[in-house]
Image (cartoon, rainbow, N blue to C red):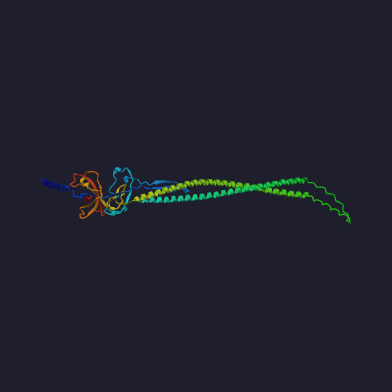
Amino acid sequence: MRRDLLIGLTVLFLFQATVTSAMSPAPLGTVYASGVVDTEQWTVTTPRITAPPVVVPMNSFAKQRNLLDGFAVTARVDARVEATALASGSGSTRIPSQIATNPITPTGIVTRLFVTEGETVKAGAPLARIDDRLLRLALKRNRAVLSQARANVLIVEKRIAELEQKQRELDQAREQIAEGKDQLDEGRAQLNEGLAQISEGERELAAQKAQLSKMKTPPLPPIPPMPSPPTSGTPVPAPAPKIPKLPNPAELKEQLAAAEAELARGRAQLEAGFAALETAAAKLKAAEAKLDDAQEQIDKGRRRLAAAHKLARVNVSLARTAVAASATELAKALVRAPGAGVVVDVTAQAGELAFSNQPLVTISRAGSAKLFLYLPPDEVRMVRLGQEAEVSIDTFSNRSLPGRVDLIGSTVEFAPSNTATERMYFSNVQAVTLLVDNPDGILKDGMPADARISIR
């Protein structure tokens, strides 16, 4: 009895396993699914090119002798036109009438296309060129303005150096004037000392004149008798007294007159010296006044040059910014590939007018593609990120491409009509995205493909 029961349970278990295996959508360890290839594409559009600013210094067109008196203004090239005056280069398509009254800003004429459909391009490869003649002229003009602005800075700095040299010369002249004043003070002291000596001599001369006027001739002493010839035994007589030599009043008067004349000449020389000192002092004062005027002019010039130097540097900054903006806008005129891939569509034509954000070229990214799969939730629970997969297409039935699970959807929904199979058409599914290697570019956008995900 027990044996029959065990046999019955075993048969029932094997029957249930067989039925479950038959009803299972995939064998254990592998998940099969079909999906649609989605290649990453870049739609390269016409860039928005803004007319670059053109810095126009005022002194470039104003007739001014001093280039430092000018200032800079910024002008912008107006590229707006009426839409009614525009038509495509082919002449077959005209702008709709509903925008005919609105002013628009076209990017420019497509002068050249460098690629064709199906061509493989590298990252940064040129795709198309927009008419850039005005942009080149603007860049050339701004570079010329930048050179002129830098030259103005050098001119101002040269004038500042010349002004500083004049300041040094002025300082040296002030030092010389200070030395001249010291010499004048020293000469004035010497003249005052000489004047004091002259005055002292005049006082002494006046005292001598007073003494001369009071001077009287003294009486002469008596003349002794003539001695007798000496005899023996007679004593020797005493010698005769000497008669003092009296000063001659006439000579004294002449000496005093000569001294008085000498003092008069000395006083006249001193007065001439004082006059010369006053003249020299007046000249120094006038020179000092001129130096003060020169200092005032130098101070004014320094302020003006400082303002001119600041303005010139501002002009250089504005011109440098304008050159950078012009170069940036000019670089936009050459449309380049954002990455390596295959050109799948060329919508532009050489000679037509392109507008901002207008599609020019479509590039399919080379190297990898995505395959969108939709699986029932009971199969998705066996799938993990990074699991390996093999992708095959009907066109190349003998070749499979490696891939891996890149994304597992978190929502459950009905399968899209373009990817649903008969088995899951009315079922709830989850999206699973595979990242597939596509080095040769054989996977095209929208191509159906089969995938086999290995479950480990």
Q: Is residue 193 visible?
A: yes
Residue 418 rendering spot, x and y as whole percentages: 21, 47
Q: Nearer the viewer, residue 237 or 123?
A: 237
The answer to whether residue 114 is left or right of residue 59 is left
Horizontally, is 16 left or right of 212 in the view?
left
Can you name the residue that lies furthest to the bottom here? 232
* Residue at the image point whose x is 60% and y is 48% from the top: 182
Relative horizontal placement of residue 267, taking residue 437 as reference (left or right): right
Q: Residue 213: x percent and y percent? A: 77, 45
Across and down, in percent, residue 369 comes to: 26, 51
Numbered label tally: 0
Image quadrant in which you'd find residue 207: top right
Left of 258 or right of it: where is 323? left
Query: Which quadrant is the N terminus positioned in?
Result: top left
Q: Nearer the viewer, residue 5 or 82?
A: 5
The structure residue drawn at horizontal position 57% and vertical position 46%, both measured from the top left corner, is 288
- Residue 417 shows in this picture: no
Pinpoint residue 446: horizontal percent, then vertical percent. 23, 49
